[in-house]
Amino acid sequence: MFSGMQGDDDIPGIGQYEDFHTIDWQRDIARDRMRHRYIVKKRQDSIWDLIKGAHDAWSGWVCVLLVGVATGIVAGVIDIGASWMTDLKFGICPAAFWFNREQCCWSDTNTTFDSGNCSQWLTWPQVFGDRGDGAGAYIISYLFYILWALIFAALSASLVRMFAPYACGSGIPEIKTILSGFIIRGYLGKWTLIIKVVGLILSVSSGLSLGKEGPMVHIASCLGNILSYLFPKYGRNEAKKREILSAAAAAGVSVAFGAPIGGVLFSLEEVSYYFPLKTLWRSFFCALIAAFILRSINPFGNEHSVLFFVEYNKPWIFFELIPFVGLGIIGGCIATIFIKANIYWCRYRKYSKLGQYPVTEVLVVTLITAILAYPNPYTRMNTSELIYLLFNQCGISNSDPLCDYNRNFTDANSAIEKAAAGAGVYRAIWLLVLALVFKLVVTIFTFGIKVPCGLFIPSLALGAIAGRIVGIGVEQMAYTYPKIWLFSGECSTGDDCITPGLYAMVGAAAVLGGVTRMTVSLVVIMFELTGGVRYIVPLMAAAMASKWVGDALGRQGIYDAHIALNGYPFLDSKDEFQHTSLAADVMQPKRNETLSVITQDSMTVDDVETLLKETEHNGYPVVVSKESQYLVGFVLRRDLNLAIANARRTIEGITGQSVVIFAGNVAPPPGPPPYLQLSRILDMAPITVTDQTPMETVVDMFRKLGLRQTLVTHNGRLLGVITKKDVLRHVKHMDNEDPSSVMFN
Amino acid sequence: MFSGMQGDDDIPGIGQYEDFHTIDWQRDIARDRMRHRYIVKKRQDSIWDLIKGAHDAWSGWVCVLLVGVATGIVAGVIDIGASWMTDLKFGICPAAFWFNREQCCWSDTNTTFDSGNCSQWLTWPQVFGDRGDGAGAYIISYLFYILWALIFAALSASLVRMFAPYACGSGIPEIKTILSGFIIRGYLGKWTLIIKVVGLILSVSSGLSLGKEGPMVHIASCLGNILSYLFPKYGRNEAKKREILSAAAAAGVSVAFGAPIGGVLFSLEEVSYYFPLKTLWRSFFCALIAAFILRSINPFGNEHSVLFFVEYNKPWIFFELIPFVGLGIIGGCIATIFIKANIYWCRYRKYSKLGQYPVTEVLVVTLITAILAYPNPYTRMNTSELIYLLFNQCGISNSDPLCDYNRNFTDANSAIEKAAAGAGVYRAIWLLVLALVFKLVVTIFTFGIKVPCGLFIPSLALGAIAGRIVGIGVEQMAYTYPKIWLFSGECSTGDDCITPGLYAMVGAAAVLGGVTRMTVSLVVIMFELTGGVRYIVPLMAAAMASKWVGDALGRQGIYDAHIALNGYPFLDSKDEFQHTSLAADVMQPKRNETLSVITQDSMTVDDVETLLKETEHNGYPVVVSKESQYLVGFVLRRDLNLAIANARRTIEGITGQSVVIFAGNVAPPPGPPPYLQLSRILDMAPITVTDQTPMETVVDMFRKLGLRQTLVTHNGRLLGVITKKDVLRHVKHMDNEDPSSVMFN
């Protein structure tokens, strides 16, 4: 098998793939093993070879180190840039225009930061001399808000359209597809990286309902791809490169949420396809380095690397599991509405004229978002800040209307007493309901427009709003009816026993879980956000309820739905293959067609070239002879083309009448023209199955062994070929979907 | 393929395995799929079938829920029992003899617990009226200590010897082997469970240098195995059962360390072989439930479910990475010494007369341990308490000599100042050095004796001692030379900048990492112990250094070494197959031997029975005919025996001359005696490879597809068979080890 691999150096281009092709993991891994053995053998020859050997052994670690460092730095740049530009919508720091509001106010020692403003920081009305609080100032602020939003969005959309169309969206569906072994040239390239970073800062700042967490995974993967080219072991081997990409995806989540363990589990559970356990350790290292670098850059000016780090000081009570599961169900429903509506809209965009005006669409969505968002303080603020506000518990220092309870804080250290909600809370609830509806509708139209946009943050925000409302409801019930049995245990003392902030967090986990169908990684990410094992059970209960509700209402998570919508050739490793077909039902050719084969020692160069011209298969089985179709091996179209061209160039006397010989042990035909020996490009160990093999076994082999095709035999005789494309089409066909929607070459 | 599966209900025993056999994952999973399809189809028939279908869908979750609850309860029982019996060596609570010292002193409100004693609790000298502190009391205590230790150890060893020999040791090597698809009947049975629980309490209490954490994994797996029989879906399908066992292993680690996420990663990384991602979520649930139940039982009377929960209030400083990596190197060396010496001693035990006197050996080890341990306070105390003491930072309430610094605590809230070590610290260091040497030597002889014993705790203790000593050294250097550049940054103020307790923790991780070669799961477990992301980087640095040193000095971790020593047929999924052999080199038969095959339609029952008698293979390829050996399918010896016996019993007229027919489409031979149609037990889709397939691909297929055997063909013609045994023997052979040491049927 793979005896042709030795020819890698002779025939240029062999072992590479074309765009939109699927990779052959077995072949690539075999190539890497061969390379490794060669290095190990040469290591004894000289000091220089020893150093090269050591470099080779270390290169995986060095590469993920570089990826981690680069991801941390880029994440810091994005955080700082987005924070500055978001504040630019509201005002400017004349003393140092490159400061955001928080930094500007740090340099001013005279004010408390609580009000959000300080004398150093000028809002736009103040810049223009209107220092009042009247309608004029409001209108100026409103207009500047909309103006900046449109400028940022227009810039972002134009950059994406002009320089890197792949930079739009969250990128996670495509990363999943790429990691499953598909080639999309340029998707992880340097232009995509640069435009995605700049566009992400712009689109986040524009106030659109989107997050930077999903695109961080894409950005980290770009960094992984680019840096892997420094190490030929990874850069020139697509299967090995995916080990680096898996680690990079982990680093991306790690910096997005400050959750290195969650990042690794996300990469393992959600993104990666072929995750050898030895890369787990390396991914963890990469994720940790990235988080460490980001924390050193300290973009938020505190010791946490995420904006919404929270700590609660009260345990949850057992009966609260009921509202938590309820939140899970609500979250699952919200998520399902979102997915169905978003997919419907994206499909409409794809097949209508709308798709031809991406920049216009972005501008319209931005304009509507900005106009509607500004009046409501909860939608006007940065979504991350909103989530942080909702996650927080009310304390002495919290002045938001959400914390307007009828209680007196006399001592900062005393326990928070139970209290009736004040007018501010009720007003806040109405505003939050409006914000929930607004965000849900706007996010449906936003996810999919042609700017970099993720949906972790919008999902978290939706869930946090729903959770906070439910939490306040339960809290007020406990205050009003402290005697009923549910509350009588822990809530009978004067202390507040319900933390609405925890409900917000549980709700956030529920919606995010419903949208993405993440499970373990979601719980671990949320756990790392709060830094306490204590709340894992509530989070898990809500995530489970949400996932089950989501699975019952609609089969796919948002990423899988987008993969299907775009027709990416993704063979899900989590879905069970449900049908009872046999290999014979799926293989090509169907009845009445003939299989294109090459014989091992009786076809001429002309015959082979005619076959290559007349058919479009990516590879051809080699058999003993036309009459006795016993399988000898498999040869790839690409290799065949290259080898024949190479032979014509380098071997004298090769003509169209030269016999092509694949077997090593066949007597060469005598006399001119000289025969063409191609056994080096013949894969003598193709994977075969019998025609009676059930398709679930075949699918299992495709997934686990990373096959590109398998040959079907009956009693040793070759019957046909099953390619990954055939499998994907068959799955689509059995699921009553259009098989031709699979994008594949 | 697996068409024979439909015969499951007809022919009793088909689909089961014999002891010390390896399972066929593909076959078992196919059986489960078939069963699942049947249930889904029947679900529409009646309400009762619908309920049965729902029960089937839920049974996995219910099963892991039960396993989690049972594991939590059993862990609570073990913790409470071991704590009581450990204290029994020192004294008794006359008011309520079932109280341990801590509980006894709780009931006594007059004393502080700091001194460790109170008026309610009587030490043995006090029981016998000697209330002094003199030599007499010391000797009485000493003798009682030794006496109880011997009683406990003798009981434990006798119970294991008499009732459940499989209950000895940590069980992790065997669990790894079982999860990789091997059958060891009784290893996870109810007797093993009961004796392991009782024996574990006794052996932990006896003061031997062993821990209860490893055996907890075995105990949890026993619970998983026993409870899986409540659900035929899992109990009657060995492949599916292993999903429950993986979850149970996670629950075992979860309760041992109070680390549910660490438990799941341990199960994923270290123990499990075939870990479909959908079981990740279920394992996590199981681990979490177990931790939750244990915390509700609250065996330690605090809010944490582990004895050595610690929190540090100081960050680490960047330069400290140097001593941390140093600790990693020291840890790797200690671990290597331990592994090599332990394996040497275990091999000696195995092949010498020593192995015949297990109870005597236990008693001798216990006696020596007790005599040497008592005089040194650090070895006299419970090892978990020692670890807790070493992990802790010195504060105002800590009265141990380890905290005898020349500093005055005036205010409990003030920062701890830098201070010179007092005489107590220096004395403690000497005692710790002695304890380190003693524990290392004694653990080498302890791990492997015939009582339940784990080595997480001894490893952690070794590392914690080494780490604390290094930590105190660094701390004193920082105190003595505050001006040198390393310390000048963070250590220039009066506050103490070095936490020796953190060094102890890092050292513990290093030794445990070196011994077990755990990586991610180790770091996550230690992280969950401390509850802070802050110390992940030091832990990771030490764990990496330790693993690399360990890998450089000796290839295997302790579990893999014990697997090899015992000859378990474990095909490591992490090791790369390094050699260049081809399938043709490994397959049976070798040159000059003939392959035992069955023809599809020309052998009589007598022929088949002769073949079964004369050969001992577990299965036979079925070919077209003797002359044209093209592969038709594969039939298992066991199925063949059962099917023929069944046919003779149920079908009239079957004689020795009846022709056995395997193919479905062959014309039956005319006339009496009637032919025997066995196509139902024929696997028509055996996995095949060509003779040119490199062995790394074959090994990959064995691992990933869970094969039991594969057939080797050349140009469609059958050449031979490769079984898992052949692969294991070949690996051993290539590694220059004795191939016949593989225990296998």
Image: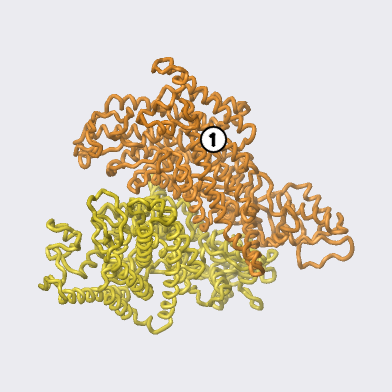
Chain colours: A yellow, B orange
Quadrant position of residue A455: bottom left
- The residue most toward the front is A483
Which quarter shows the C terminus of chain B? Answer: top right
Residue in front for this viewpoint, A708 or B332: B332
Q: How busy is the neighbourhood of tag 1: few (under 14 within 10 Å), some, or many (20 plus)?
A: many
Q: Report whether A143 appears left or right of A227.
A: left
Inspect the image, locate mark 1, and give the three-letter code of the amino acid beneath it. Answer: Leu
Q: Quadrant of residue A237?
A: bottom left
Image spot of residue B191 (x, y percent) = 63, 39
Q: Could you tell me which residue is drawn at 54 percent across and 35 percent down?
A: B200
Image quadrant in which you'd find residue B525: top left
Instruction: Confirm whether residue B150 shows in the render.
Output: yes
Protein chain holding label 1 = B
Count of numbered labels shown in the rendering:
1
Q: Picture coordinates of residue B145 (x, y %)? A: 48, 23
A690 in relation to B523, above or below = below
B495 on left or right of B603: left
> Residue A129, image x and y in percent?
10, 72
Quarter that holds the N terminus of chain B? bottom right
Q: Secondary structure at mark 1?
A: helix
Q: In the current view of this chain or complex, which residue is farthest to the bottom?
A: A353
User: In screen coordinates, is B487 left or right of B151?
Assistant: left
Residue where numbered disc 1 is placed = B200
Q: Residue furthest right?
A: B672
Depicted B346 relative to depicted A661: above or below: above
Q: Which residue is rendered at x = 34% and y = 33% of the image?
A: B468
Nearer to us in this view, A429 or B247: A429
Asked if residue A66 can be seen in this view, the reply is no
Q: Is residue A730 above or below residue B26?
A: below
